[in-house]
Image (cartoon, helix red, strand yellow):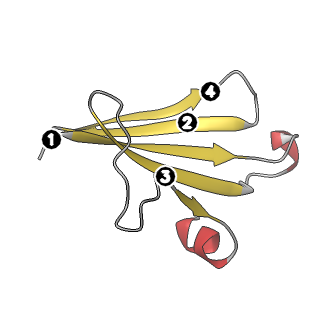
Amino acid sequence: MNYKLELNKQGVVPNIIFHNIIFDFFKVNIVERYPKSMASTLSPDFVIFKVRTLNDEIINTKKGNGRVKLKGDTLLTYK
């Protein structure tokens, strides 16, 4: 399976960073939210994962959620 990485796409808000992993049939959006001053820390407050089709339609999980939010212990594993 082929893939393409798009890393560190800065949004309008300076403390939010977008990453994309684009596969042949779908893509994964990763949104990292940092404290207001990113210079003070290199650790995000939380991370959101979304899986989308190539037409930007969100693919829901089995529980019907459109995104997965990592905080606390799961965020430590992500780091």
- Which is more N-terminal, label 4 or label 2? 4
Where does label 3 land, which residue?
Answer: 49
**Mark 1–mark 3 distance (CA, rounded to whole Å):** 20 Å
Disc 2 residue type (three-letter): Phe
Q: Position of residue 33 (x, y in %)?
A: 70, 46
- Pointer 2: what residue? 18
* Residue at the limit of the structure toward the front, as seen here: 64
Residue drawn at x 58%, y 60% is 69
Q: What crowding class fits label 1: few (fewer than 14 Cα within 10 Å), some (14-19), or many (20 or more)?
A: few
Mark 3 against mark 2, which lies toward the viewer? 3
Residue 10 tag number: 4
Considering depth in this image, is 43 or 18 the residue closer to the camera? 18
Residue type at mark 1?
Answer: Asn
Viewer can see residue 51:
yes
Q: CB atoms at circles 2 and 4 under 8 Å apart? A: yes
Task: Give the answer, above or below, for where 21 lies relative to 56.
Answer: below
Tell which circle, 4 or 3, labels the residue nearer the N-terminal end. Answer: 4
Q: Residues within 10 Å of mark 3 (few under 14, many from 20)?
A: some
Query: According to the image, label 1 marks what residue?
Result: 2
- The residue at the far left in this view is 1
Q: Position of residue 2 (x, y in %)?
A: 15, 41
Instruction: Label 1, secondary structure: give it.
Output: loop
- Label 3 SS: strand
Instruction: Compute the Cα span from label 4 to label 3.
Output: 16 Å
Residue 15 vs 74, above or below: the answer is above
Of mark 1 and mark 2, the one earlier in the sequence is: 1
- Disc on the earlier residue, 3 or 2: 2
For numbered disc 2, what is the local secondary structure? strand
Find the distance from the CA under tag 2 to the CA under tag 4. 6 Å
Dots 4, 3 in contact, CB < 8 A: no
Q: Would residue 43 be seen by someone viewing this image from the given angle?
A: no
- Bin the neighbour count of mark 2 within 10 Å (Cα to Cα): few under 14, some 14-19, many 20 and up: some
